[in-house]
Image: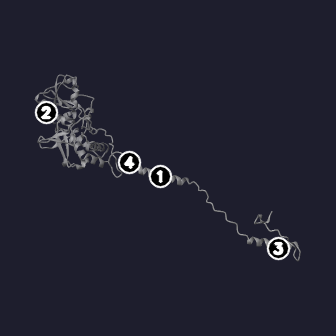
Amino acid sequence: MPESSSRFAWPLRRRMPGPDGSAEDIAVQDVAEREAADRQLPPPEPEPLVDPPPRFNLAMFRLAALGLALVLALALAVVRVFVGGPPSVAELRAESGVDTWTVLPIGVKDDQPGVAFRDKNGVWSGFDIDVAYMIAEDLGFRRDDVRFYGMESEDRLRMQAVDLAGKRVPVKMVIASFSITAEREAEPGVTFSQPYLFTEQSVLTLTKSKHRAVSTLRDLKGDRVCSLSTATSVKAFVGYDIDVISRNRMRECIADLRNGDVDAVSTDAAILAGFKDRFPSEFQHWDLGLEKTEAYGVNVGDNLALKKLVDLTLYRSYTDPADSRWESAYQSNLQSETANNKTTPIAVAQQPRVSRPAIRELPWEDVFG
């Protein structure tokens, strides 16, 4: 091997024996020379440092994934609460215009004892009146802010009532023993709330007339029967050979019956029960046993936002055990009439089931009670 082939190669030298000429002297000399050479050589270059490959941390990965999921869920919730989804109560109030109304005009009947009646002193009473106050309260109106206006049956679709001076007055809602039907809902400008009362059709006759017992429509064959115009009860007489006299107000039908101009009056049992209760010896109240149920609703016209607010009141009243306003209205106006009406049904003594309206509830609100 050449001398320059390796820095660790020792130069070839001939060693001559020293004065002593012994082999031991030569060995000692070689060791000394090697140590001196090692001290003169530069140190070897250090090997470069290399970072070890990173280890996969599953726990940290799971924690990061959970954090990302929480952020996405929070972002989605914020979008749903403040941007998307159904309107909030505040938005419905703004859209309906409720916050701009100083008073709340409501169209009602004024001649139906137990349902909606205005006495000679101008005092309003009845189940519909109490339901109206319940809705008005949730809309933010005091009782003094509510204005009731009597209306004829045909004006319930037009949402126009008449004041004491005979002037026509537009109303914001109609709560006037108004039955929900598909035909009425198809009319322009008619929007019903969910139902707030179930009743059925019945018949009223004079006690002194000794009219034969009435249990079906066939028992009215050949009779002159008064009913309200545009009422759903009128259609029930078709095909029974009954002469129907239509009036716009119930007091007109009762006057015809008392005068002997008609043999009977037929409409909703909740309406006729009030007359039987107040004049128990004058009238006979008959159950027709019809399967058809009349469902009363609130007509809000074209105001769809107001419909949702009314439905919200009905939903709260139905679902909240602490809310007894509907039950109190029924007890004081309809249940109290059962004694004088005996076995004739008046109305279902339970609030109709109300589905939850599509309203967005903000986190700090308790919209649905």
Which residue is painted at 46% across and 50% down in the image? 69
> Which residue corresponds to mark 4?
80
> Which residue corresponds to mark 1?
68
Labels 2 and 1 touching (C-beta < 8 A) = no
SS at mark 2 in the image: helix
The residue carrying pointer 3 sits among few (fewer than 14), some (14 to 19) or many (20 or more) residues within 10 Å by Cα, namely: few
> Which three-letter amino acid code belongs to the residue tagged 3?
Gln
Q: CA distance from mark 4 to mark 1?
A: 18 Å
> Which residue corresponds to mark 3?
29
Labels 4 and 2 touching (C-beta < 8 A) = no
Q: CA distance from mark 2 to mark 1?
A: 72 Å
The residue carrying pointer 4 sits among few (fewer than 14), some (14 to 19) or many (20 or more) residues within 10 Å by Cα, namely: some
Q: Earlier in the sequence, mark 1 or mark 3?
A: 3
Labels 4 and 1 touching (C-beta < 8 A) = no
Instruction: Give the mark toward the camera: 3 or 2.
Output: 3
> Which three-letter amino acid code belongs to the residue tagged 2?
Glu
